[in-house]
Image (cartoon, rainbow, N blue to C red):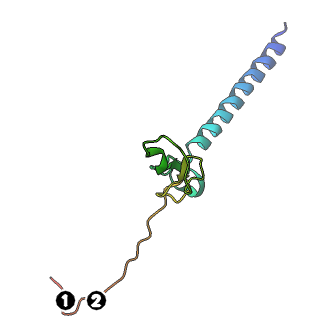
């Protein structure tokens, strides 16, 4: 095999490895992103949107009620079934304190 062919094959091999590394980096970055909207997963349901229904806790081991429609799973009450942690709304109001004095 001539040296020119070997150099060409070596360059192609390096190109393939570089491409594979770039794709792996992109895929890893996508997996590390939080779920939709930039919010993290709900800690109660772990992003599954569903939690075990209360009817599973009954002593007769029968599954099914009007809340879960027989599935044994109900909507997560912490995230409202979105699967993501939602920020709590906060209201801040400025107020003037009568008779307030400034300290020097």
Q: Secondary structure at mark 1?
A: loop
Look at mark 2 in the image and give the residue it sits on: 96
In front here: 78 or 71? 71
Q: Where does residue 103 sit, x and y in percent of width and height?
A: 15, 83
> Nearest the camera: 93 or 102?
93
Q: Quadrant of the N terminus?
A: top right
Q: Tell me the quarter of the image containing the C terminus.
A: bottom left
Q: Which mark, residue 47? A: none
In the picture, measured across the screen, residue 86 lies left or right of residue 24, that is: left
- Camera-side residue: 40 or 99? 40
Q: Image quadrant of residue 25?
A: top right
Q: Residues within 10 Å of mark 2 (few under 14, many from 20)?
A: few
Q: Is residue 1 left or right of residue 100?
A: right
Name the image quarter holding residue 75: bottom right
Asked if the residue at tag 1 contacts the one at tag 2, i.e. Cβ–Cβ closer than 8 Å, the answer is yes
Measuring 40% from the left and 76% from the top, which residue is drawn there?
91
Q: Which residue shows up at 28% across the image and 89% down it?
A: 96
Q: Is residue 34 visible?
A: no
- Position in image of residue 27 (x %, y %): 64, 38
Q: Tag 2's secondary structure? A: loop
In the rendered image, residue 17, in percent from the top left (x then y), is placed at: 69, 25
**Would residue 27 appear left or right of 54 to someone viewing this image?**
right
| Separation (CA) of disc 2 from disc 1 | 8 Å
The residue to which callout 1 is attached is 100
Q: Which residue lies most toward the bottom here?
A: 99
């Amino acid at each position: 095999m001539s040296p020119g062919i070997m150099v060409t094959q070596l360059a192609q091999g390096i190109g393939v490895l570089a491409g594979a590394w770039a794709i792996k980096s992109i895929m890893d970055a996508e997996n590390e992103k939080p779920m939709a909207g930039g919010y993290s997963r709900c800690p109660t349901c772990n992003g599954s949107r569903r939690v075990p229904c209360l009817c599973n806790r009954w002593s007769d081991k029968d599954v099914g009620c009007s809340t879960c429609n027989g599935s044994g799973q109900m909507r997560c009450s912490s995230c409202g079934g979105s699967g993501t942690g939602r920020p709590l709304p906060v209201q801040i109001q400025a107020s003037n304190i009568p008779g307030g004095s400034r300290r020097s």
